[in-house]
Image (cartoon, helix red, strand yellow):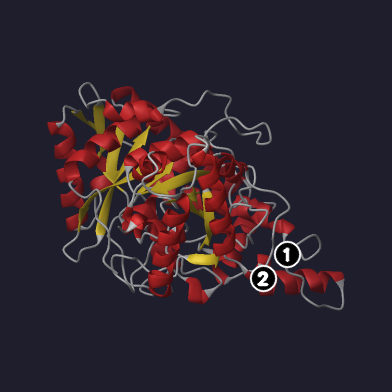
Amino acid sequence: MDLYKLTLRQAQQKLAAREITAAALTESVLARIDQVEGSVRAYLSLHKDQAVAAAEAADKKLAQGQGGMLCGLPLSVKDVLCTATMPTTCGSKMLEGFIPPYNATVVEKLLAEDAVLLGKVSMDEFAMGSTNENCAYKDKIPHNPWKLGYVAGGSSGGSAASVAAGECLASLGSDTGGSIRQPASLCGVVGMKPTYGRVSRYGLVAFASSLDQVGPLTKDVADCALMMQVIAGHDQRDSTSAKLEVPDWSAALQDGMAGLRVGIPREYFGEGLDAEVERSIRAGISMLKDAGAELVEVSLPHTEYCVAVYYLIASAEASSNLARYDGVRYGKRAAADSLIDMYRQTRSQGFGDEVKRRILIGTYALSAGYYDAYYKKASQVRTLIREDFVKAFAACDVLVSPVTPTPAWPLGQKADNPLALYLSDILTISANLAGIPGMSVPCGFSSEGLPIGMQMQASHFNEAALFRAAWNLEQRAGVKGNMPEL
């Protein structure tokens, strides 16, 4: 049996019944990595010895009737999350070979539940990008497992590709403007951005602090609920972490759609939306209606400003956060004759073009004479965007829409057109600006066999509504369990 094809829940049941061992499960996933990694290129660093040792330790616990919720389950982790026993490079030459002195809170939680960590997966440099092509390690740019030579999405492209290809059972990514949901959609897996503050950001290397959020990428909705159960919760080390109890999201999976109001934002179905994507999403909406949902048309009138607002705020925060990489404290240090020259050479050599572009935009937007015209104005419009969602959720429980305007496209097609890539995020960035939870659920395929995902969004801390709607769609869409042949 190809154990790497199991979901988390299936593997969990088989391990508990002693039908399989954690060692055998991990060996199956490692064999799958050996088989396909040369084509998929999801991993930046793989740690087989650590994984095998963790699996053997998990088997000992299972034999004694012990072990956590993820005991013996092999996972990957995006390289933006600090790991004390593995390098954390953020896909950048600036942090090449850097091993943090501590684990991110979410990594601690995985380990506390006895998960098996396989390694760190590829990402756009410092999470800045939509295709993973901005990764500084060009031989580690992931390919879409459904069609090699096509983008896996970004910035959590390695996470999505590793799950879709069977190179892990689930993964953790980060989402600043759609970086979990977009690659999840393009690779045909489930991806969730929780409400801002639901999951600790301690140990997540910062891109844009008011937008970043950690979340899971999984093979199905039930696995997503399980991963969220593990990683959510208050963390006193994160001042933005919400002091809320963690609900039992798995309980929401069995609830039907009766009484659930599904909102359809008219602005998300306009010009530029691929016909096959729209057909697939409309079909998914019909499935939700057939399941008992009430359909409501809503408006998010400030959607047209989202891209401009996002790239001003995100770039400004990135400019501030990335100022720490100066060659003094940690990371790359260039040889130079003076302190100023060392700063200049370190940042010139350590950062890639996209990171430099966003630092320049952000620094300009924060500079004297321009702060009020750009950053302050963007922050004010952000409030209006958030208010749009508050009004929409007064009329509905869940918003549904496409995740991206098109399915995946060939690698290199948009690499030289940053504006085209920025516009590809137009349907996902508003959730980050408003701080609400969002989710991508597979709902169909294009004529080329490329996955299409439906985006679901809910009001603050109402992830239960997302799980309820997503699980019901999953049962009807007929795409659960599909895996690329590779």
Mark sitting on residue 331:
1
Sort mark 2 into few (<14), some (14-19) or many (20+) by Cα contacts within 10 Å: many
Mark sitting on residue 350:
2
Nearest the viewer among 87 and 364 is: 87
Instruction: Using the image, determine if residue 176 lies above or below residue 412.
Output: above
The residue under the point 54% across, 52% down is 56
The residue under the point 58% across, 38% down is 200
> Are dots 1 and 2 in contact, CB under 8 Å?
yes
Instruction: Using the image, determine if residue 156 lies above or below residue 265.
Output: below
Q: Residue furthest right?
A: 338
Residue at disc 2, secondary structure: helix
Is residue 296 at least partly visible in the picture? yes
Residue 168, given in percent of the width and then of the height, sits at 43, 56
Nearest the viewer among 254 and 396 is: 254
Nearest the viewer among 171 and 408 is: 171
Residue 251, given in percent of the width and then of the height, sits at 35, 26
The residue under the point 64% across, 53% down is 83
